[in-house]
Structure formats: C-alpha cells, structure tokens
Amino acid sequence: MAQTKSQREEIVKKFRQSELDTGSCHVQVALLTNRINDLTEHFKTNKNDVHSQRGLVKLVNRRRKLLDYLRRKRPAEYTKLVADLGLRK
C-alpha cells in the first residue's frame, strides 16, 4: 500500500534534524525504509510482480547509497539511525 500523507508527515517529524527539515539523509532513509517494507509485504502475496521488484531494487540501492554517505560523513548518526530503523540485526 502506498504511503499516506499522514504517514509521511509522522516519519518526517520523527527523523528530522530541525523544524524545517524534510530532505536530510535521515528523513530520506526513513521514508525509503517505509516504502521498502511496504513492498516486501506486497511480494508475500504477489510473487510474480516482476515490475515492482525492479522498483524495489532501485529503492534499496538508493537507500544503500544514502547510508554509505552517512556512514562516511557522520558515523555516530549512522549507527543511531540504523538502530532506530532496525536495519541491522
């Protein structure tokens, strides 16, 4: 299911760095993670949806690049974000 406006606003409020922040790495990674989790649930019932699988791969790659950037520039914030989102187990 697609993200609703209220879901996006809630995620932005949780991960923003300042009052007007809507596009920092933290927010982008959190929004991408939410979309990736939604698509993962979608594939549990629709195994043959190849077109959406391509989109999922693109989202995962974009999130990976943002996380790599964050790990290089601000390692402490990277580890906190990964822990908050539950990406590494």
Image: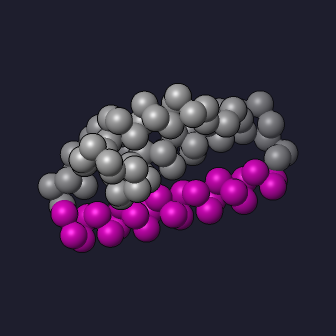
Left or right side of 87 for 36:
right
Left or right side of 4 for 31:
left
* Front-most of residues 1 and 39: 1
Q: Position of residue 72 (x, y in %)?
A: 24, 71
Image quadrant in which the N terminus is located: top right
Residue at the spot 57% in from the left edge and 33% down from the top edge:
5
Quarter assignment of residue 65: bottom left
Q: Position of residue 78 (x, y in %)?
A: 25, 55
Q: Is residue 46 above or below residue 66?
A: above
Marker count (numbered): 0
Left or right side of 51 for 14:
left
Left or right side of 60 for 74:
left
* Front-most of residues 47 and 70: 70
Q: Residue furthest left?
A: 76
Residue 89 shows up from this direction: no
Residue at the spot 54% in from the left edge and 57% down from the top edge:
60
- Residue 60 in magenta? yes
* Front-most of residues 81 and 16: 16
Residue 54 shows up from this direction: yes
- Residue 37 in magenta? no
* Front-most of residues 63 and 13: 13
Residue at the spot 81% in from the left edge and 55% down from the top edge:
51
Q: Position of residue 6 (x, y in %)?
A: 53, 28
Quarter assignment of residue 88: top left
Q: Is residue 11 above or below residue 76?
A: above
Q: Main secondary structure of the magenta part?
A: helix
Image: magenta residue range:
50-74
